[in-house]
Image (cartoon, rainbow, N blue to C red):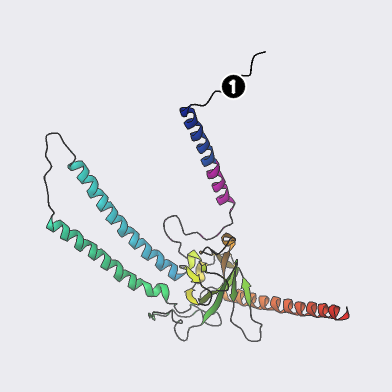
Amino acid sequence: MSAMARPRPCSASGLHILRRRMLKVLLTRGLTAALAGLALAPAAASAGAIFPEKGGSENADKIWTLYLLIFILAWIVFLGVAGALLWALVKFRARKGTVAAQIHGNTRLEVGWTVGAFVILVFITVFTFITLPGIKNPPASDIDANGNPVTASNVLYASTDQPDPPKGSPYLNLRVDGQQYVWRYQYPKQGDLPEVFSYVDMVVPVGMTVTLDITADDVIHSWWIPKLGGKMDAVPGLTNKTWFKIPPDAIPEGEDQVVFHGQCAELCGRNHANMLARVVGMRYPDYQAWVRGKAEQIKTAREQAAKTREEIDKQNSTE
């Protein structure tokens, strides 16, 4: 009976091929899993492929304009430098029988690019400071306290800290509280209605300036609704401020609301990816109806909780 043949040892080239195949399989599977995760992930905030999103609020539009200007200038500088480099590589490439000239600087050229860079930086600085007040300072509302359209205000102002909107103009101030892993919104008290609050969905009237006092209960979060402006950190023990104003015509024809999606932009724990947010813009009468309905829900829930607590106390006292 013949002995069983021993396995032949794999050569170095065979091991190399095997490793390449294994690496190819791992990369293919990893890319497939990543694409599947992106396809199945819930809709959340998006910064856009190249430019930040805009169209939801005036400050977001101004951020987009400033971004576009700097983007264009950066490309002009890049193409100029890269073009000059390629031109020099081709024109002064090595040739047989040719000795390169030894050049020790060019005063005019050096002064020219230094002055050019200085002028570009001054222009960006001036344009930024002209645009910045419109990004940071909340404007007057387009509607009054009763939801009626008002004449647009031309008041301009600037401050180190975010000021209130112009005097005489109504606005809605909300407290945004980041909690692992949900956003809580506290609304101002209105008349005899109980205090209204909501989670995840922030409902606001279109045309009215909305100012936000942003904080957190536990760890650092970051409030971010891309189409309504930039990010703002939510830090425990501190209050940061930002604002937005949804135009009245943002609601599509035939619809009763417009929705803007957002997400926490600061890694805040293992469930950070699911800390989503939505801003729902409604016409003023619909917004008022929502506030009354939410207040009634909270009132009913508190009454039911009080009854349940009394029943539990009675059961405990009879035992």
**Picture residue at 24% right of the left edge, 62% below the top:** 117
**Element at badge 1?**
loop
Please identify the quarter of the rendering in which residue 316 is found: bottom right
Residue 52: within the magenta? yes
State whether residue 208 appears in this view.
no
Q: Is residue 164 left or right of residue 314?
A: left
- Image quadrant holding the N terminus, namely top right
Give the x, y percent position of residue 118.
Answer: 23, 65
**Picture residue at 44% right of the left edge, 67% below the top:** 60
**Picture residue at 20% right of the left edge, 45% below the top:** 88
Residue type at tag 1:
Arg
Residue 124: within the magenta? no
Figure check: 254 above or below 129 = above
Q: Is residue 64 left or right of residue 233?
A: left
State whether residue 32 appears in this view.
yes
Residue located farthest toward the top when viewing the structure as drawn: 1
Figure check: 186 above or below 268 = below
Task: Depth check: give the residue in front, 83 or 310.
Answer: 310
Q: How many labels sit on residues?
A: 1
Give the x, y percent position of residue 102.
Answer: 11, 47
Q: Which residue is mark 1?
A: 6
Give the x, y percent position of residue 17.
Answer: 48, 31
Give, as a single range, the part of the protein colored magenta. 29-56
Task: Depth check: give the residue in front, 244 or 148.
Answer: 244
**Picture residue at 57% right of the left edge, 47% below the top:** 36
Give the x, y percent position of residue 301.
Answer: 73, 76
